[in-house]
Image (cartoon, helix red, strand yellow):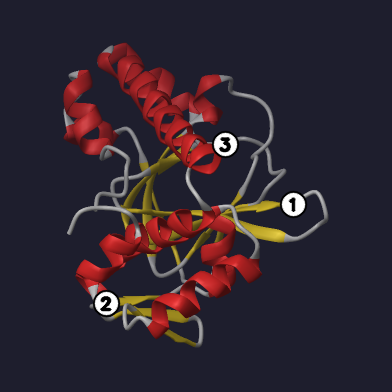
Amino acid sequence: MATGRPDWRSLGESAGIDERALRAGCVRRRFDRGEAIFHEGDPAGALHLVDKGRVAVRLTTPVGEVAIIDVLQAGDTFGEQALVDGVGERTATVTALERVETLALDRVAFERLRVEHPGVDRFLLMVVSARLQFTSRQLLDALHLPAELRVMRCVLRMHAMFCAERGDAIPLTQAEIASMAGVTRSTANRVLRTAQVDGVLAIGRAQIDVLDAAGLRRQAGLRS
């Protein structure tokens, strides 16, 4: 199962901007596991293109809790609003889940790049469009899919993201799956425990192991 977002490299190619030119216009940033790339409320800075590793996106809820809303991997982007309006504050906290490298494109570098490569404007529009399309699909799922399917599809998407390097282990807690799926912790715990009884998953400490990938797809309401 794909993560649901097009790779920034393919977006650049579609926009007519060479990847080498895009990389040359950015500054490589490196972050250790657990390090915050920026915090919710920070001044808007640069667009980040994830080149290596994975990051967690977290928001503060109205009751003051911090909830993870997404996990991004190499090929994904975040912080595009910094280039759209150039002002404002970060709307989420982004933290490295492992060693991460991003290509940061700030407003000054963006303006310089667009002089030599007009396709960068189209690239930014495509990045924003891809974000909106993904958000729209998530909203439709939240409105129309039962909670059980949302939980299992979240697990399936995380499995697709992590399985290449970690086998069948998803290094996330049940609470983190719950917040990404938009359900309560008790609902996620119930759904995941049922999947464990069915032999689809094994729930560990801060980790979920997928035992039956085909069974996971079936319980997510998808064809094997």
Q: Earlier in the sequence, mark 2 or mark 1?
A: 1
> Which residue carries the number 1 mark?
61
Q: Horizontal and vertical percent for residue 163?
A: 25, 70
User: Label 2 crowding class (10 Å Cα cut-off): few <14, some 14-19, many 20+?
Assistant: some
Q: Horizontal and vertical percent for residue 132?
A: 45, 28
Q: Earlier in the sequence, mark 3 or mark 1?
A: 3
In the rendered image, which quarter contains the C terminus? Answer: bottom left
Cα distance, mark 2 to mark 3? 36 Å
Nearer to us: label 2 or label 3? 2
For the point 46% across and 77% down, the residue is 194
User: Does residue 187 appear to the left or right of 131 in the view shown?
Assistant: right
| Amino acid on which the number 2 mark rests in the picture | Asp
For the point 25% across and 70% down, the residue is 215
> Which residue carries the number 3 mark?
45
Cα distance, mark 2 to mark 1? 31 Å
User: Does residue 41 appear to the left or right of 1 in the view shown?
Assistant: right
- Residue 168, labelled with which disc? 2
| Amino acid on which the number 3 mark rests in the picture | Gly
Q: Secondary structure at mark 3?
A: loop
Q: Secondary structure at mark 1?
A: loop
Q: Earlier in the sequence, mark 2 or mark 3?
A: 3
For the point 55% across and 30% down, the residue is 82
Can residue 119 be spotted in the picture? yes
Task: Kindly indicate whether the residue at mark 1 contacts the one at mark 2 (C-beta within 8 angstroms).
Answer: no
Q: Horizontal and vertical percent for residue 210?
A: 30, 77
Q: Secondary structure at mark 2?
A: loop
| Amino acid on which the number 1 mark rests in the picture | Thr
